[in-house]
Image: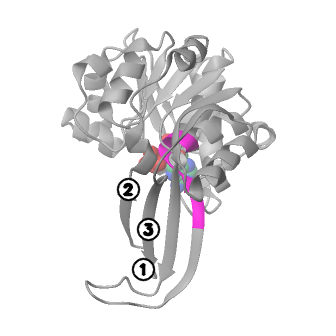
Amino acid sequence: MISVFGSANMDLVAYTARAPQRGETVAGRAFATIPGGKGANQATAAALAGADVAFFGAVGDDAFGPVLRRGLEAAGVDVRGLRTVAGSSGIAQIVVDDDGSNSIIVVPGANGAVTGASADDLEVIGRSDALLLQLELPMAAVVATARAAGAPVVLTPSPVQELPGELLDAVTLIVPNEHEARAITGLADPEEALGALLERVPEAVVTLGSEGALYGSRAGERLHVPAVPVRAVDTTAAGDTFVGALCVARAEGRSNAEALRFAATAAALSVQREGASTSMPARAEIDAALT
Ligand code: ADP
């Protein structure tokens, strides 16, 4: 079983020829509401990849809360640990213009009200093969839950920020993309960044977009898994799909090389489709693409 303690957001996406300037109103072309948030995305990816998944977090008592909850349920995620709190759900207001550039306002809403996992949550987390954490909840809540987990902690350090030592001390596997790896270590070379990360945590994966991913462990294992060559149409949540699938394969006892190939295959399927949670592959698709 996989536990995820993290954010759930509603992405409110307006498509327009040109983003408005200050004080200006422009006519948009289309609008979409897409469930997102790195926590909910990783939970969805892991559930679709075949694991039992429990999600812990919060949504608001607004119109988006039930939609976010039902979206997770539809993917098979156990949402008994998803609280409903007064106020708005987390949202990301996104303007996408015809150049494909976007501007985004993220309002944490209910995510910002999460303080930590409850005793009941921790009982479930303690029975899990892995606890997946990201950095879209308050840092104090992330640190407290990591330290109390009683399960291997897998951290996606995004959005990138200063990482407290007490958090890293509780992490088994850290999975930054190459930009995050550089920001954390100050090293531009991914191999060197991987080495620096391993001075702080036992295992690390640096994802490299269409270049694949590097894995390293303090035990001395080093792997490079190439990306699966595909025509990418939307790489949103490629990393979340990768992490969710990676942890499912590790929980099934696969070797690191096999687990990385499973994750790269799942992520490659997701980048060929639009959207975040809407683009993630089911287990049968991943298995079919692997053979
Ligand atoms: P993030 O989405 O967090 O920025 P990356 O862009 O590094 O993360 O992508 C995560 C993983 O998704 C990569 O390691 C790779 O396996 C897969 N991936 C990303 N972009 C592509 C692509 N264009 N083609 C195939 N696989 C991709």
Number of residues whose C-alpha sits closer than 10 Å to that of mark 2, classed few (under 14), some (14–19) or many (20 or more): some
User: How far is mark 3 from mark 2, CA to CA?
Assistant: 11 Å
Residue marked by disc 1 = 99
State whether residue 63 is above or below residue 85: below
Q: Is residue 131 magenta?
A: no
Q: Which of marks 1 and 3 is nearer the N terminus?
A: 3
State whether residue 220 is above or below residue 143: above
Secondary structure under tag 1 reads loop
Q: Which quadrant of the view contains residue 169? A: top left
Residue marked by disc 3 = 94
Residue type, label 1: Asp
Q: Which of marks 2 and 1 is in front?
A: 2
Q: Is residue 37 magenta?
A: yes
User: How far is mark 2 from mark 1, CA to CA?
Assistant: 25 Å
Q: Given contact means CB atoms under 8 Å apart, are the residues at marks 2 and 1 in contact?
A: no
Residue marked by disc 2 = 107
Residue type, label 2: Val
**Residue 174 place in picture, x, y as percent:** 40, 27
Number of residues whose C-alpha sits closer than 10 Å to that of mark 1, classed few (under 14), some (14–19) or many (20 or more): few
Q: Can residue 203 be seen in this view?
A: no
